[in-house]
Amino acid sequence: MKKLLDLITEELKEAFAKAGYPNDKVTATVSNRPDLCEYQCNGAMPLAKEAHKAPLQIAEEVCSFLKDSKSFSLAEAVKPGFINLNITGNFLSDYVNQMAIADKFGYEEEENPVKVLVDYGGPNVAKPLHIGHLRAAIIGESIKRICRFTGHETLGDVHLGDWGLQMGQIIAELKVREPDLPYFDESFEGEYPKEAPFTISELEEIYPTASKKCKTESDTYDAAFAEAAHQATAELQHGKPGYRAIWQHIINISVADLKKNYDNLDVHFDLWKGESDVQKYIPDMVEKMKAEGFAYESEGALVVDVAEETDKKELPPCIIVKSDGATLYSTTDLATLVERMELFAPGYVIYVVDKRQGLHFEQVFRTARKTGIVPEEEKLFFLGFGTMNGVDGKPYKTRDGGVMRLETLIAEINEAVLEKMKENREFESSEAEETAKIIGLAALKYGDLSNQATKDYIFDMERFTSFEGNTGPYILYTIVRIKSILSKYGKTPSGKVEFTGEKTEKDLMMKLTMFSQMIDAAYEECAPHKICSYIYDLANAFNSFYHEVRILTQEDEAKKDSYLSLLLLTQRVLEQCIELLGFSAPERM
Ligand code: ARG
């Protein structure tokens, strides 16, 4: 379906042409003075000079060709040359009725879809998920769903951090604790056990203990251990069978735990690939970079220059191989692009990662372009997100100042929601807990997504879980309210809206018509917050309508059916939008 604003623009363009003016720059917008009119057009202003006429006169001439329009109930030229427009209720309700029966509410899918790969999550195995990974998961999942909705084929990749020093540290610690395990027996030739020698909770204790022993500033620092961990990492990376077997255990156990956590967040990946998967691409990639003259030696390291003349800040070269022969985070990300191009050939790759990694991605992207790993026509985009802070403005912490685990945060939110729910009404305890989980997730995700991703934001438990204001629970409350009205009605409304002349009814319809436009903006700008502000407006428009107009107590059956049809569409649009944000509504709350 054409967008409503495009239909209005077309009619305006025609009137400009009839009045004898060029119309290529004519557009209609939603009025910024809703007290004066619904839509507006400023197209007469720039024509004045060329036409040697006052803009007001041009606007008046154009308006004279809009008098008999079936779309406009008002087309009026006002000083200094604007055109104020109102549309007729019928034109609007026709449009809304078409939306109701169209697929995706009439949203026109991308004509030339591409494969979009979204790299998000980025957890590091063996380390528990903490809230630093929360934003990546929440924003990435929503971006992926938005891309999918617009008609692109999408792939979400978790891109595990599964190749770092933490692996060697765990292996070294295990060797200290259980030296007799077959993994450490150089002469062992049998098959290694299928069962891991540790559980996830043991792993979560082993890793921090080992990691502390490697930190010079910690009180348990152990230089010999740190060296052993280094050694173990190198041996693992060179393929030592016993260490590979331990590594596989760590991956299996961590991934199972991660999946459980992501499931709780309703976050799902198509690909569970990691840094380890791409190591095999590195040697060829490096050779090629050298052979083609892109990579050269500098102070013992192998680097690629990425600075460009137009740079305002100096961009250091991208290091591919360190002087000791080790590869780096950037090497792995480049090899990941090699693999992605080979296996999936995506037209667009979106990275949803902490914005402090901006420089890293700038270097990686430039190197990938320069060396031909990623051809010019494939888009690469870094969506760097800001930090989630506590009410004190500092990165969110536990009460005793530690890094908060995701599970703890979720439990705290659900608890806060449960209390709010109980203030409202009585619940059976099992229903209450289920519902609190659904609302808690909405509070968490909406609280995050309603902010522009690139900005830092304050995680305010009290505000995010409130049933009023610009919050997830308020949106859910609105949906539940509509559901309850519809169920009291007892039958399915016809689905056809006929405008009855109510102002709030018209406002609600006008908000509904903005759906497709909003989706386009959310996709183009990678901006889930646009969906949030749209549904906040839509929920407010519905609530005003609900307070102003008698719906269920309406005597006129035709009117009642029309109102309920409007409600049904509102509910469907709201539910579609929250699906794109990554949460859902309960039956009751
Ligand atoms: N594991 C990384 C971290 O915790 C994030 C990975 C982001 N994705 C990427 N392709 N580098 O910082």
Image: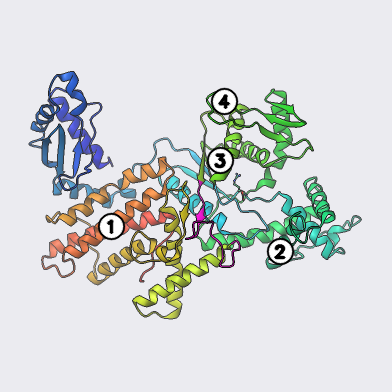
Mark 3 to mark 4 CA distance (whole Å): 16 Å
Q: Which residues are magenta?
A: 385-403
Crowding at mark 3 (Cα within 10 Å: few <14, some 14-19, many 20+): some
First of labels 4, 2 by sequence position? 2
Q: Nearer the viewer, residue 555 or 41?
A: 41
First of labels 2, 1 by sequence position? 2
The mark closer to the camera, 4 or 1, is 4
First of labels 1, 3 by sequence position? 3
First of labels 3, 2 by sequence position? 2
Indicate whether 389 appears above or below 437: above
Mark 4 lies on residue: 308
* Magenta residues, dominant SS class: loop
Residue 573 percent location from the top left of the image: 32, 55
| Left or right relative to 314: residue 76 | left
Mark 3 lies on residue: 358
Crowding at mark 2 (Cα within 10 Å: few <14, some 14-19, many 20+): many
**Quadrant of residue 294 within the rendered picture:** top right
Mark 1 lies on residue: 570
Report if the CB atoms under discs 4 and 2 are less than 8 Å apart.
Answer: no
